[in-house]
């Protein structure tokens, strides 16, 4: 016969296990409740220009900063902007130039951490049109792809047309997305040229060695040649009202992006690629890796907005948009560095 004390041991063990499970569940629920929920609309998650936003999730940096972040992948920057203005997202991971453009429409948007110091935009001729289109001027009357009408790719196209003496409305603008859909549109001859970003540009170059590039802003040298100065690309931005009402969340997002940028600087392209989602990398890892190596110099080291870069964006838009030129925009109100500065005081991690 089993002594009563021995019979009670399994029951004690069961109670202990249940208590442990209940405690773990309570801690999990408490942690979830403590985390702030933030929805970020991304203007094309497959684009390497937005890699820091996606990589921050893969590294768990949002959670470390006390955030429960949902990334919503959209076709282009204009769609991401619409999501925030419409209230279905809190923050845009997109190009800073939208903040300047919308200021002309009396919409108060502000970037609070910059992760691309160059735009990375590339104006590429479709492989089947290489012999026909040899300069930007040859685009008149042609079909040119952009991620989505009203996106930064569209703004860049209009700027390049104007810069080369063409009417910005002299081409037919076609929305083709940023990833595989853009590559397919170019390969199938649905469009004559397109404004693209990596990895799509490198993918095309891998298949077409004589691919004609009319303008390239993936490096500092090319950016200076195209714009005459620095020109910031991707950033996290939102409405001024949201930022003012959610300073804790804006600071946490800034901390997460800065930690990710630091991680990028201390790891190899191969290690970075290994952290990215398989569906983002795709089947041809060699091409993705080549594109990533081309893109890494584009990522910011500080997260700060250079005021001169913001001025350059305003100058570029003023050339292509009479509305912006006549709006008397105070560009200093379209960005803030205070969250990056606070992160520097707290962690000392920002240059």
Image (cartoon, helix red, strand yellow):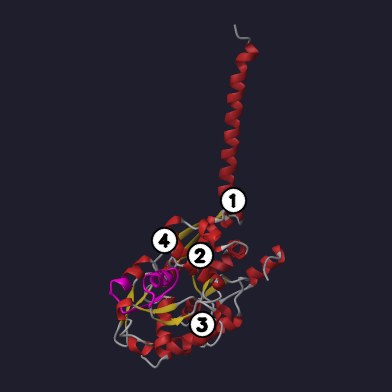
Circle on res. 51: 2
Residue neighbourhood size for the residue with mark 3, other residues' Cα within 10 Å, grouped as few (<14), some (14–19), many (≥20): some
Is there CB contact under 8 Å for labels 2 and 1?
no
Residue 146's x, y, as percent?
37, 75
Q: State the SS at label 3.
A: helix
Badge 1 vs badge 3, beta-carbon distance below 8 Å: no
Instruction: Quote the CA–CA distance across marks 2 and 3.
Output: 21 Å
Picture layout, residue 68 above or below residue 103: above
| Residue 162, x across and y down, in percent | 41, 90
Q: In the rendered image, which residue does mark 3 sit on?
A: 222
| Residue 200 x %, y % | 41, 69
Of pointers 4 and 2, the one earlier in the residue sequence: 2
Q: Please tell me which residue lies in front, 254 or 220.
A: 220
Q: Earlier in the sequence, mark 1 or mark 3?
A: 1
Q: Which residue carries the number 4 mark?
A: 284
Q: What residue is shown with label 1?
A: 34
Marks 3/4: CA–CA distance: 27 Å
Q: Secondary structure at mark 4?
A: loop
| Residue 263 drawn at (x, y percent) | 61, 61
Q: Disc 1 vs disc 4: Cβ atoms closer than 8 Å?
A: no
In this rendered view, identify the residue nearer to me: 273 or 231.
273
Q: Is residue 236 visible?
A: no
Q: CA distance from mark 2 to mark 1?
A: 27 Å
Nearest to viewer (mark 2 / mark 3): 3
Q: Secondary structure at mark 2?
A: helix
Nearer to us of marks 1 and 3 is 3
Q: Nearer the viewer, mark 3 or mark 4?
A: 4
Whichever of callouts 1 and 4 sits on the residue coming sooner in the sequence is 1
For label 4, the crowd category at 10 Å Cα-Cα, with few meaning under 14, some 14 to 19 and many 20 or more, is: few
The part of the chain drawn in magenta is 185-210
């Amino acid at each position: 016969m089993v002594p009563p004390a021995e019979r009670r041991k399994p029951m004690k063990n069961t109670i202990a296990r249940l208590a442990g499970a209940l405690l773990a569940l309570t801690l999990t629920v408490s942690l979830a409740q403590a985390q702030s929920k933030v929805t970020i609309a991304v203007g094309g998650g497959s684009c390497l220009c937005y890699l820091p936003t996606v990589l921050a999730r893969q590294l768990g940096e949002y959670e470390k900063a006390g955030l429960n972040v949902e990334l919503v992948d959209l076709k282009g920057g204009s769609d991401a902007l619409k999501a925030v203005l419409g209230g279905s997202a809190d923050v845009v991971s997109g190009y800073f130039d939208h903040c300047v453009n919308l200021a002309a429409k009396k919409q108060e948007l502000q970037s609070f951490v910059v992760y691309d110091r160059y735009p990375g935009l590339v104006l590429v001729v479709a492989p089947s049109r290489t012999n026909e289109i040899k300069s930007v001027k040859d685009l008149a009357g042609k079909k040119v792809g952009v991620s989505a009408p009203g996106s930064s790719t569209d703004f860049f196209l209009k700027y390049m047309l104007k810069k080369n003496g063409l009417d910005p409305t002299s081409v037919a603008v076609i929305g083709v997305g940023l990833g595989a859909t853009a590559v397919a549109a170019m390969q199938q001859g649905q469009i004559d040229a397109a404004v693209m970003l990596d990895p799509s540009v490198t993918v095309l170059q891998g298949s077409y060695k004589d691919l004609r590039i009319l303008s390239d802003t993936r490096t500092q040298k090319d950016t200076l040649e195209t714009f005459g100065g620095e020109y910031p690309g991707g950033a996290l931005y939102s409405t001024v009202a949201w930022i003012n009402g959610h300073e804790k969340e804006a600071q946490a997002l800034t901390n997460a992006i800065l930690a990710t940028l630091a991680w990028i600087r201390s790891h190899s392209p191969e290690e970075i690629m290994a952290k990215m989602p398989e569906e983002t990398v795709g089947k041809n890892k060699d091409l993705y890796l080549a594109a990533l190596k081309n893109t890494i110099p584009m990522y910011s080291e500080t997260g700060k907005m250079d005021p001169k870069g913001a001025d350059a964006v305003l100058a570029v838009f003023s050339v292509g948009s009479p509305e912006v030129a006549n709006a008397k925009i105070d560009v200093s109100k379209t960005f803030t560095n205070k969250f990056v500065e606070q992160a520097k005081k707290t962690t000392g991690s920002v240059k």
